[in-house]
Amino acid sequence: MFLDNRQVAMDSVLEALADSIDYFQDNIERLRPSLRDCLKPLYEERLAQMRKLQRLARKHLRMLPRDADVERDDFLWLWSRLKSFVGNDSQVLINELLEQERVLMQALSTLFTHPLPDSVEPVVEDCMKDCRRLIRELYGMQKRKVRR
C-alpha cells in the first residue's frame, strides 16, 4: 500500500517520536540523576502522546503500525557511546537529545502543511508545544554545563 503525502508526513512524526523516546530510554542510565529526574516525566508524557497519535493515525488516516528500525537504533546507540569516549558524556547526551528534538520539530512542521482531521490536530499541536518545552529544557541544561 502506497502512502499519500499526508500519511508520509504523519509517519515521519511517529518515527521521530519513537526515535526520541527510544534514544532517551536506551541512554537513561548515562544521565546524572538530576537530569534524569527532570527529563523522565517529559518523555513519559511523550510516550502517551505518541500512542494516542498512533491510534488516531490508524483510525483517521488508515495507517498501519510499522516495525522499528532496530539496526538504525543500534547504530545510533553505538555512535553516541563512541562520541562519549571523546567528550563529556552528559554533554554528548544533551546534544544528541537536542538533535532528536530538531528532527521531531521538522517532522511536525511538515505535517502541519497538510490538512489534519479535527481530532488529530490538537494532539499534533500538543506534541509541538512539548517539543518546544523540551528544547528549552535541554538548551538550558546545555548552557549550564558549558558555564561550569
Image (cartoon, rainbow, N blue to C red):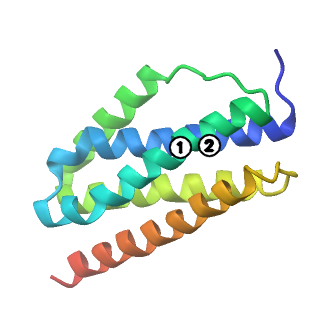
Position of residue 95 relative to residue 76, above or below, is below
Residue 55: % across, % down: 63, 34
* Distance between the alpha carbons at the discs numbered 2 and 1: 5 Å
Tell me what residue is drawn at x 38 percent, y 38 percent. 22
Q: Is residue 75 left or right of residue 46?
A: left
Res 85 visible: no
In the displayed orientation, state which residue is furthest to the top: 1
| Mark 2, residue position | 53
Q: Is residue 54 left or right of residue 37?
A: right
Q: Is residue 94 left or right of residue 136?
A: left
Position of residue 95 relative to residue 111, above or below, is below
Q: Quadrant of residue 53?
A: top right
Instruction: Mark 1: give few (<14), some (14-19) or many (20+) Cα within 10 Å.
Output: many
Q: Nearer the viewer, residue 20 or 48?
A: 48
Residue 33: % across, % down: 11, 60
Pointers 2 and 1 in contact (CB under 8 A)? Answer: yes
| Mark 1, residue position | 50
Amino acid type of the residue that numbered disc 1 sits on in the rendered structure: Met
Tell me what residue is drawn at x 51 percent, y 65 percent. 130
Residue 14: % across, % down: 60, 40
Q: Quadrant of the C terminus?
A: bottom left
Q: Quadrant of the N terminus?
A: top right
- Under tag 2, what secondary structure? helix
In the displayed orientation, state which residue is furthest to the left: 33
